[in-house]
Image (cartoon, rainbow, N blue to C red):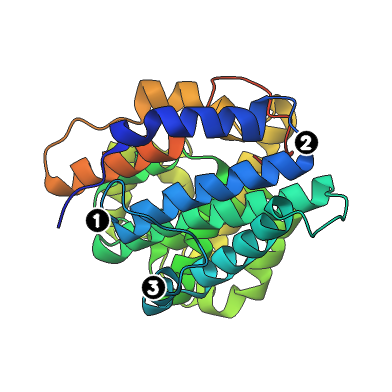
Amino acid sequence: MHMFNNEAYEPLLRDLMNDAFYANTSNRGKIAKIRQCAEVALRRILLLPQGSPMTLGQRNIQTAVSNLNNPLLTAAIININRSGNASTHTQDLSEKTEEDVDSVVDSLFDLYSYLMIAFFEKHPFGSNPLIMKAFSLLPPIIRYKALSYLYTQKPDNVFIIDKLALATLKAKSREDALEWVDTEANHLKSLPSMTEDGKRSILNHVGDVLGREIIDSSPDMYDLCLDKINLVGNEIDKEGKVYYDFETALPYYKKHGILTVNSPEEAEFNSIMEFLYLGRKENCISISTSSS
């Protein structure tokens, strides 16, 4: 199986991202460009040969997506294809709103999240502390989407739970994070907070600023999640979010998120992260949508 060549698609994605997120483009134009971004993302997901013809609506493409059996991915492709068609064809005369753009961007982020979901289905989340640390340098919304799905598949993985609680806090709000913990309370209380190996993994490699004390004082994942949500929530209330979208996260990714490759797993992860940041501009305000 061939590897996806990020470099070959970089000029295209640079233009598409500029027109979709940074230039003064109409809402109709933004949706059309985001659809093209989605086509490139789907090329990566399906590992299509470079230069091969494809559109989101092609029967063979739809079959390939269906065969992956992921409802998040399927729904995203349907929404982007429908909205993209409406913004491309001249028979649709309706005005396109910012809400229409937000909906398509949200589906594009589902595609990005799927790349991480597929990776962690092959390489269990928590098995490589360095990858966990670099994963945290993605925008909160991407982490939230990926972890939410992974939790439905591996609800006993304490590393997924730990990161999902904080991703919910950062992508949404403290209230949303606390509501999630409350909803999952019975299950979370049934799980010990961390094994000794898990504690060493987080503290020694990920550099968890909360320290061993908060882990040792939390007998189960319910208490651990509550403690972390409230402590990190207080820090956010005081200092604000360090990064919240691709543009503000980009400098941190460049500085801390590129792994020194020691395994094929780390090389694959680096390639996915590089792809997700292609075309993004550092600390540039996106004019397309507040969620980007």
Q: Which quadrant of the structure image shows residue 205?
A: top left
The secondary structure type at the circle numbered 2 is loop
- The residue under label 1 is 127
Front: mark 2 or 1: 2
Front: mark 1 or 3: 3
Q: Quadrant of the C terminus?
A: top right
Residue 59 numbered mark, or none: none
**Relative side of 37 to 86, left or right:** left
Residue visible at 31% across and 57% down in the picture: 119
The secondary structure type at the circle numbered 3 is helix
Query: If you read the primary sequence from the N terminus, does the residue marked by circle 2 or circle 3 appear first?
Result: 2
Where does residue 115 sit, x and y in percent of width and height? Answer: 39, 55
Q: Are marks 2 and 1 in contact (CB under 8 Å)?
A: no
Q: Nearer the viewer, residue 73 or 175?
A: 73
- The residue under label 2 is 26
Q: Nearer the viewer, residue 224 or 93?
A: 93
- The residue under label 3 is 60
Q: Which quadrant of the structure image shows residue 80?
A: bottom right
Q: Nearer the viewer, residue 210 or 239?
A: 239
Estimate the spatial distance between the alpha carbons at disc 2 and disc 1, rounded to whole Å. 44 Å
> What amino acid does circle 3 point to?
Asn
Residue visible at 12% across and 44% down in the picture: 263
Where does residue 276 sit, x and y in percent of width and height? Answer: 43, 40
The secondary structure type at the circle numbered 1 is loop
Q: Are marks 1 and 3 in contact (CB under 8 Å)?
A: no
